[in-house]
Amino acid sequence: MTAINVKETGRQTYGEAARRAAAGAGSCCGGSSCCGSSDVLAGQNPITSNLYEAAQTSGLPVEAMLASLGCGNPTALAELAPGETVLDLGSGGGIDVLLSARRVGPSGKAYGLDMTDEMLALARENQRKAGVANVEFLKGEIEHVPLPDNSVDVVISNCVINLSADKDQVLREVFRVLKPGGRFAVSDVVTRGEMPEQLRGDMQLWAGCIAGALQDTDYAAKLAAAGFQQIGIEPTRIYTAEDARDFLDVKHAGLASIAEQIEGKFMSAFVRATKPAACGCA
């Protein structure tokens, strides 16, 4: 499996998800596997369902919710303050960017970064409908963020970093663009213990939030290697064997038999870390 193959699969999958959302249909994160093959608004997907409270999303376009592909709600857990600059990696239809823009207020700014033209078009339309001015959507890859060094206060992401085939590079880029003292505050799918090797090679499961997930201890080690401190990984949902059968759907019938082996080993988690206030760089 190459990084190019993973990226192209993701581009195709999320482009189709954007088209579905723009047409008013629910989207999902992983082709037919959808991280659970359920409409995101139906509340049945074990990973993507029930992430946002109605009061939080009031006034946002329904298309932003339909394009929600995440595994958590980083905007509810991240400590955002008025006047801060926020970057959302893999911003999709823009829901977390729009929510962040509310939190940082007119004196702050929220950037969304996405590699998919269809998602960027959808996000910009959602921004227009929401009437939010302090937002900018950028085209690019999370391994190569098109922003200068030390330019943002907080980096958020919602079930996207696990999709990258080069997570070390992603974390180095996050460290680079954060200001000294800046915060990493993302929702992601992580694992505990060993995961069956069969899952690692399935390309649709990479696009569906599962196969690319890091073990929690590996995630913490990669953050530390990138230079971060105050690292924490807090489970927000732990998935059962029954949940596993949902996201290992009929197209993955050969994998569904191993659902019992991953009981409690997959979880959505809030991952946080801080860039040192003085990095000591030359």
Image (spheres, helix red, strand yellow):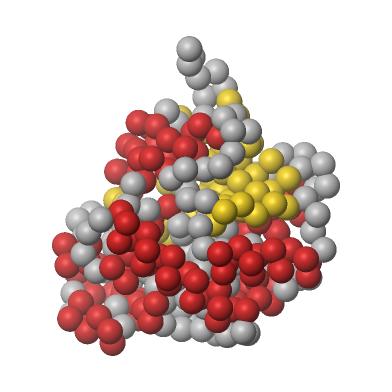
Q: Is residue 9 above or below residue 232?
A: below
Q: Foreground: 67 or 13?
A: 13
Residue at the spot x=29%, y=78% of the render? 248
Image position of 198 with respect to 26: above or below? above
- Vertically, is 208 above or below 20? above
Residue 4 position within the rendered picture, expressed as x and y whole percent measured from the top left: 32, 56
- x then y, percent, for residue 75: 63, 54
Q: Is residue 264 visible?
A: no
Residue 204 falls in image quadrant:
bottom left
Q: Quadrant location of residue 267?
A: bottom left
Instruction: Choose between 173 and 101: the one closer to the eye.
Output: 173
> Where does residue 56 sit, x and y in percent of width and height?
71, 65
Expressed as whole percent of the image width and height from the top left, the position of residue 237 reads 44, 63
Work out which quarter of the rendered image holds the N terminus and state it.
Answer: bottom left
Q: Quadrant of residue 246?
A: bottom left
- What residue is drawn where x is 25% and y is 56%? 2
Vertically, is 187 above or below 151? Answer: below
Q: How many marks?
A: 0
Instruction: Please state if 132 lies on the left or on the right of 213 as rendered.
Output: right
Q: Tell me the residue at 47%/37% (across/down).
A: 173
Query: Is residue 140 in view from this perspective?
Result: yes
Q: Residue at 69% x, 41% y: name it.
A: 85
